[in-house]
C-alpha cells in the first residue's frame, strides 16, 4: 500500500503556496528548512480552535503557562531533562533567542564563536547586531563524522570570544552530539568562563537509536553557563506561527530576564504558543510516524545518488537535512563544465532544476557542499539525488 505522502507532486505542493515551493523557481524545492509532510492533526485542531475563539490578541498568562508546562513535560519525557516550567520563556524564534543571549548574557562587544558549517543566519546576523563572528571549522572524528575542533574552540576563546553557539542536532550536517563530546566542550567553556547558546530546535528529530542530550542537562556547570533555544517549529512543521522558547537554567539569568520580560517575549505569537503546546502534549504519535518516513528518506537520497563515491554523503543522525560534499566530484569535471564563478547552489539549480542551499552560505567551511532538505515526498528525494549525481557525472 502506497504512502499518501509519496503521491504529492510538485504541482500540488506548489499550489499550497509555501515559501519552499514558491520562493525560488525550481522543479524540486529542497532548500529552506520547512516540511512538505503536513502538520499533526492535533496541532491543526488546536490552531483552529484558538482562531475560532478569537484568541488572536497578545499572549495571555494561561496560554503562556501552558506552554512552559508542555515543554517541561516533553523535555522530561524525551530527554530525561526535568525543568521548572517557570524557566521556559517564549520568544518569537530561536534566532531572536540568540540575539537576546548575546545582548543580555555575553561580555559587551565580545566576538561570538561559531562552529562551521552553520545555520546561515548565525553566520551573518551577529555582525548586524554589532558582534564579530569567529568561525571555527568542524573537524572529523575517527569514523569521519563532523565534530567540534576543541583546540580551535579553545583558541577562539583565547582570542576574546565569549559566547559559543552550539547547534545540536547540527544544522546543516545532521550530527547529533554524544554526551562525551558535550562534556569535553564544557571543560573548554568553563576554563575560559564562557557562555553557550544551545540551539536545540531540531532535538525532536533524531533518527534510529540516537538520543538527544540537552547540553544544559549534562552537569551543574553546563546548566549555569547555558541559554537554550527550543521550539516545536521544525519537528511539527509550524515555523510560520512564530513561537520558540528560551530555557534559562541559570538563576541569575532568569532574574535578569524577569526584569525585562514584557519586552523580551513580545515577539511570541499566541497562536504559535497554542500550537507548540499541542505539539509537545499530544503530537508524539504523529512525530514518531514522521520520523519513520524521514528515516526512509535518508536512505532514499543514497539510492538517488547511486552511492557515487565522489559525492560525500553521511546520512544525518538528526534533523531532516542532508549535507553533501561535492568537492571531489566538482574537481573531476572537465574544464568549463563546472560552476566556475557562478555560486554552486545557483549552478546546480540551473543545471538540475533542484533548489538547494549553497554550503558557502553556511560559512567558509561549507564551500563545495550543499544542504538538501529531505522533508518532502520520497520520489522527489530520489529524483533530486539522481539529478545531482547525473549533473556531476560528466
Image (cartoon, rainbow, N blue to C red):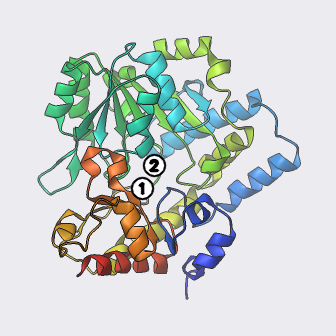
Q: Quadrant of the N terminus?
A: bottom right
162 and 234: which is toward the camera: 162
Q: Secondary structure at mark 2?
A: loop
What residue is pinned by disc 1?
319
Determine contact: label 2, label 1, CB under 8 Å: yes
Res. 202 mark:
2
Q: Residue at x 61, y 35 (%)?
A: 92
Q: Is residue 47 above or below residue 14?
A: above
Q: Quadrant of the C terminus?
A: bottom left
Q: Quadrant of residue 14?
A: bottom right
Q: Residue furthest right?
A: 53
Which residue is at a point 50% across and 73% down the rendered structure image?
28
Does residue 130 appear to the left or right of 218 in the view shown? Answer: right
Q: Few, some or many C-alpha atoms within 10 Å of disc 2 (few <14, some 14-19, many ≥20)?
A: many
Q: Secondary structure at mark 1?
A: loop
Question: x%, y% of residue 259?
Answer: 61, 11
Q: For marks 2 and 1, give the CA distance.
A: 6 Å
What label does residue 126 carry, if any? none
Residue at 72%, 57% in the rendered image: 44
In the rendering, at what x and y percent does residue 156 appear? 22, 26
Asked whether, in this view, residue 330 is left or right of residue 315, the answer is left
Q: Position of residue 38 (x, y in %)?
A: 62, 65
Q: Is residue 107 above or below residue 299?
A: above
The spot of residue 186 in percent (x, y) is 26, 28
Give neighbour class at mark 1: few <14, some 14-19, many 20+ (Cα, 10 Å). many
Q: Quadrant of residue 64?
A: top right
Amino acid at each position: 500500500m502506497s504512502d499518501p505522502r509519496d503521491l504529492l507532486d510538485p504541482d500540488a505542493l506548489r499550489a499550497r503556496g509555501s515559501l519552499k515551493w514558491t520562493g525560488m523557481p525550481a522543479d524540486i524545492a529542497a532548500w529552506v528548512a520547512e516540511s512538505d509532510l503536513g502538520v499533526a492533526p492535533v496541532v491543526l485542531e488546536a490552531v483552529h480552535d484558538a482562531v475560532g475563539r478569537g484568541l488572536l490578541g497578545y499572549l495571555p498568562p494561561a496560554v503562556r503557562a501552558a506552554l512552559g508546562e508542555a515543554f517541561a513535560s516533553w523535555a522530561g519525557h524525551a530527554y530525561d531533562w526535568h525543568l521548572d516550567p517557570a524557566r521556559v520563556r517564549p520568544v518569537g524564534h530561536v534566532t531572536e533567542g540568540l540575539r537576546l543571549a548575546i545582548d543580555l548574557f555575553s561580555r559587551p562587544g565580545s566576538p561570538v564563536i561559531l562552529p562551521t558549517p552553520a545555520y546561515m543566519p548565525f553566520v551573518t546576523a551577529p555582525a548586524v547586531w554589532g558582534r564579530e563572528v569567529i568561525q571555527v571549522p568542524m573537524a572529523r572524528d575517527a569514523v569521519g563524522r563532523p565534530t567540534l575542533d576543541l583546540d580551535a574552540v579553545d583558541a577562539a576563546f583565547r582570542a576574546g570570544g565569549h559566547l559559543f553557539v552550539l547547534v545540536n542536532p547540527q544544522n546543516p550536517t545532521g550530527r547529533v552530539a554524544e554526551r562525551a563530546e558535550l562534556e569535553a566542550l564544557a571543560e573548554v567553556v568553563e576554563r575560559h568562563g564562557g557562555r553557550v547558546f544551545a540551539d536545540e530546535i531540531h532535538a525532536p528529530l533524531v533518527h534510529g537509536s540516537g538520543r538527544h542530550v540537552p547540553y544544559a542537562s549534562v552537569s551543574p556547570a553546563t546548566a549555569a553557563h547555558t541559554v537554550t533555544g527550543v521550539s516545536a517549529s521544525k519537528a511539527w512543521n509550524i515555523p510560520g506561527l512564530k513561537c520558540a522558547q528560551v530555557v534559562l537554567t541559570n538563576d541569575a539569568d532568569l532574574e535578569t530576564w524577569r526584569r525585562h520580560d514584557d519586552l523580551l517575549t513580545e515577539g511570541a505569537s499566541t497562536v504559535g504558543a497554542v500550537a507548540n503546546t499541542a505539539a509537545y502534549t499530544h503530537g508524539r504519535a504523529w512525530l514518531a510516524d514522521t520520523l519513520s518516513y524521514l528515516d526512509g528518506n535518508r536512505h532514499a537520497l543514497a539510492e538517488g545518488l547511486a552511492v557515487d563515491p565522489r559525492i560525500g554523503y553521511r546520512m544525518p543522525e538528526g534533523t531532516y537535512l542532508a549535507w553533501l560534499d561535492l568537492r571531489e566530484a566538482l574537481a573531476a569535471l572537465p574544464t568549463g563544465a563546472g560552476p566556475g564563478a557562478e555560486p554552486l547552489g545557483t549552478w546546480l539549480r540551473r543545471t538540475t532544476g533542484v533548489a538547494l542551499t549553497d554550503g558557502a552560505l553556511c560559512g567558509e567551511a561549507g564551500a563545495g557542499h550543499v544542504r538538501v532538505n529531505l522533508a518532502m515526498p520520497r520520489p522527489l528525494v530520489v529524483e533530486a539525488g539522481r539529478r545531482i549525481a547525473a549533473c556531476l557525472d560528466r
